[in-house]
Image (cartoon, coloured by chain):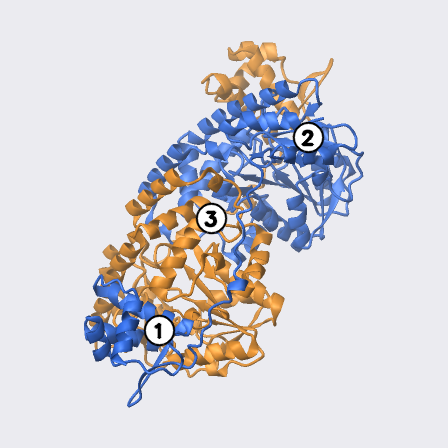
Chain colours: A blue, B orange
């Protein structure tokens, strides 16, 4: 037995690094041997004294490793019977076939898929500086369990100032709720609407399919509004829906700014029916030719739930968003949010607060606005005379109209050019009453600067 | 009119900082004036030329501000009628009474509430270093929308190595799912259990009330197991429940390590009934006298869903947790998690990965283990001969047994000493079949080092 144990010991590839490492290594080797079946159930182990001698280590180290595995149930130790491999230490290795190694799914080399900023432009150095200041200034309690389901007050105060100044939002830190991006905000909003009113929500006839799907999974039925060059036809809103989800600053994806008359109609509808307006201000910071269009929320802070994120202005990977909630709804939103106890990292909230109050956020947005505007101009120049481009006054995407019946083939042709791009039809609500329209939704914010040239060339080659 | 506008202009407190700031300031002032009713609906505004002259600014700046407010619906501009305050610009200021200014809720000066590490010991400098390295090394796509609902592969690989080494967990990065702390993990687990089996889950008769409440709100009925000096009586598990939530390393709050026989009974139950074991390894890193007790998960990775977090080892404020999921359940967990699109910040995931792989995590845990052990020893010394203290071999809390019928009065007496502490009864499941027990659950990890002395003195003074 001793000899086989000496062999086994060598087999363990023990790193004799001493101290805790040695005991832990021995325990893990024994555990693995029992788990794999190399040490069969019922096998009697050598005494700690003899194994220690064989391995040239302290007896106590072996005894401790044995004790650890007994406590975990791998071994049994009984007076007179020695230490044995327990019956339940049958090999339980998850079947290799069941392992779900997902392929990395390398897509096309170039992407004009909408909805993403240029993530290569994330301001790493400025963010690190803000993190340093946040870490230096954070009170100890910031590292504890958050006491306020609304999120850190430092961030809510910074956001209130910023949103009032840059987006015309009537904000108050008390009514700002920090959340983990737009999807989280939409889920919370939908839960509040469901709890109060109906299970039906109006959405724009062209809208982000993942938002529709998210609402559907949450049990909210969506009713499409027609969309035209003035944005969603809010005059069509009826009493049957409890809420409407709008993109007033820059309709996604068609690109129109909701006109004053349509804004008025939405607010009037909300006032008359008690309905709630969810304002998705996803890229309100980026406007190029015209003056910025302020948030609809300012017109009626009692009926508009304003939803914003750092996903377009900074990076989706941060998972930081915010809701500006009508006064009467704060407790309802928190009842839903608090039930899940999810808040974003306090440290990243403090970092974003620092980033905003130091002016780094404004600087970054300004720089990105110039960069995106230049790209838009280059896109227009490259396509001049070939296709009609609309939705270009703002945001990170444009709509390229195509000859009738060609959308699918152009998307396919782009794939041959190693370019990922999406057709407008993907964003069309299945029940929408809209004229047929073949078009591409081109997210010109998505590529990195270095990929931009070849991406534009691939798009140009793919167009009819 | 010109004069009143000059007054009004002065009233605006315009900061004449030039450029965008000046226009934005004017727009915000006009917006606020319309919102507050200071500019009544229908009021005709002076021409941009005359207001510009009165304010001593460029006419174009005024015209741009007017255009912005027209686009937002605050003003109307009609040929021949000039620029007027729109009808819908009625004051909509949220009623001051509805403002929900929550008081900061200053509690007692000292706290021994369990469940928190010493947040004053958060390793700020080491975390900043890890952030710096994470920012320097992150691929651009890390800042984009996460492609894998399991979380960043860098963190899952670091966790797989750490959990195998330190906790005896049979881990594979493919089966690790990063989440936003334990509550998130429990919600996801409960949803999976509900989708597969029953709406009933066994819990320990003494357990964290907020976990019970969270399950109840999610529609899962909890059935208490009896708890004694060997941990939960897993031999009582029946076929009626689809899952059991256990704290095998250190029963919360009574402090027992689940014995080998009880571990075996749990695994046997799971094998026989197809039930799922949720292992809450909340403070497995902190063990003082005995050898560390490895995770139950290693005994049967196919039936144990292992749940861990950085909340006790680092800080709850990070909201970082992880699940090690049985192979057959990965897709089910991701179906639930993916539906909500919530992942933790990619940057913090990368930072934690750096923190672990650089050895900083081990160093921090080692340092904290010494610190907590010293506190535990000081607690024992301070209370020697006065009360029986149990659950002291591990973790960040101990149980102090009290004379029958005195728990409530001791908690009250502690409050008079400016000390927050909780009685054991709070953690007792309402349906639990357990003998009466008066005790305090003392979280000695909670105070900062500087508060520790006075906190201990307050506790001592509060005891009978």
- Residue A150 image offset from top left, x and y in percent: 49, 48
**Cα distance, mark 3 to mark 1?**
30 Å
The residue sitting at 28% across, 72% down in the picture is A7
Provide the secondary structure element on which disc 3 rests: loop
- Residue B181 image offset from top left, x and y in percent: 45, 57
Dot 3 and dot 1 within a common chain: no
Q: Is residue B192 left or right of residue B445?
A: right
- Residue A48 image offset from top left, x and y in percent: 24, 78
Label placed on residue A344? 3
**Cα distance, mark 1 to mark 2?**
61 Å
Neighbourhood count class around disc 2 (C-alpha, 10 Å): few under 14, some 14–19, many 20 upward: many
Q: Is residue A85 or residue A291 the one in the foreground? A: A85
The residue sitting at 52% across, 13% down in the picture is B55
Relative to A379, say whether B295 is above or below: below
Relative to A331, say whether B261 is above or below: below
Q: Is residue A418 or residue B64 the one in the foreground? A: A418
Neighbourhood count class around disc 3 (C-alpha, 10 Å): few under 14, some 14–19, many 20 upward: many
Residue indicated by mark 2: A258
Q: Chain of mark 1?
A: B
Q: Which badge, 3 or 2, is on the more N-terminal residue?
A: 2
Which mark is in front, 1 or 2? 1
Q: Can the viewer see residue B445 in this picture?
A: yes
Residue indicated by mark 1: B255
Label placed on residue B135? none
Q: Is residue A323 or residue A387 the one in the foreground? A: A387
């Amino acid at each position: 037995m001793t000899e086989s144990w000496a062999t086994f010991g060598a087999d363990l590839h023990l790193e004799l690094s001493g101290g805790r490492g040695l005991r832990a290594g021995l325990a893990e080797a024994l555990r693995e041997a029992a788990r794999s079946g190399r040490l069969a159930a019922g096998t009697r182990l050598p005494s700690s004294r003899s194994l220690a001698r064989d391995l040239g280590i302290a007896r106590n180290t072996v005894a401790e490793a044995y004790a650890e595995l007994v406590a975990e149930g791998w071994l049994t130790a009984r007076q007179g019977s020695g230490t044995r491999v327990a019956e339940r230490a049958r090999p339980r290795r998850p079947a290799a076939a069941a392992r779900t190694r997902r392929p990395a799914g390398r897509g096309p080399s170039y992407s004009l898929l909408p909805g993403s900023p240029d993530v290569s432009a994330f301001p790493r150095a400025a963010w690190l500086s803000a993190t340093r200041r946040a870490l230096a200034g954070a009170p100890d309690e910031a590292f504890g369990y958050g006491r306020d389901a609304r999120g850190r007050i430092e961030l809510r105060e910074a956001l209130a100032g910023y949103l009032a100044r840059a987006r015309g939002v009537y904000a108050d830190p008390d009514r700002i709720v920090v959340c983990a991006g737009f999807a989280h905000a939409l889920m919370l909003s939908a839960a509040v609407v469901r709890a109060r009113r109906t299970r039906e929500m109006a959405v724009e006839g062209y809208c982000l399919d993942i938002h529709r799907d998210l609402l559907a999974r949450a049990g909210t039925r969506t009713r499409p509004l027609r969309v035209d060059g003035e944005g969603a036809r809010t005059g069509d809103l009826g009493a049957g829906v409890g809420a409407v989800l709008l993109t007033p600053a820059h309709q996604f994806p068609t690109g129109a700014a909701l006109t004053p008359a349509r804004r008025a109609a939405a607010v009037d509808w909300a006032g008359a029916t008690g309905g709630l307006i969810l304002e998705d201000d996803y890229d309100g910071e980026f406007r190029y030719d015209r003056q910025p269009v302020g948030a609809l929320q300012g017109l009626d802070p009692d009926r508009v739930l304003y939803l914003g994120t750092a996903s377009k202005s900074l990076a989706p990977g941060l998972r930081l968003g915010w809701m500006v909630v009508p006064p009467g709804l704060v407790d309802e939103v928190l009842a839903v949010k608090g039930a899940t106890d999810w808040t974003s990292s306090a440290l990243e909230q403090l970092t974003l607060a620092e980033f905003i109050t130091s002016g780094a956020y404004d600087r970054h947005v300004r720089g990105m606005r110039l960069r995106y505007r230049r790209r838009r101009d280059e896109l227009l120049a490259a396509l001049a005379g070939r296709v009609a481009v609309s939705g270009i006054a703002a945001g990170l995407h444009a709509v390229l109209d195509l000859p009738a019946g060609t959308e699918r083939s152009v998307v396919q042709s782009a794939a041959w050019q190693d370019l990922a791009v999406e057709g407008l039809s993907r964003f069309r609500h299945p029940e929408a009453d809209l004229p047929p329209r073949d078009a591409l939704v081109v997210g010109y914010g998505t590529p990195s600067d270095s990929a931009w040239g070849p991406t534009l060339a691939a798009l140009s080659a793919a167009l009819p």
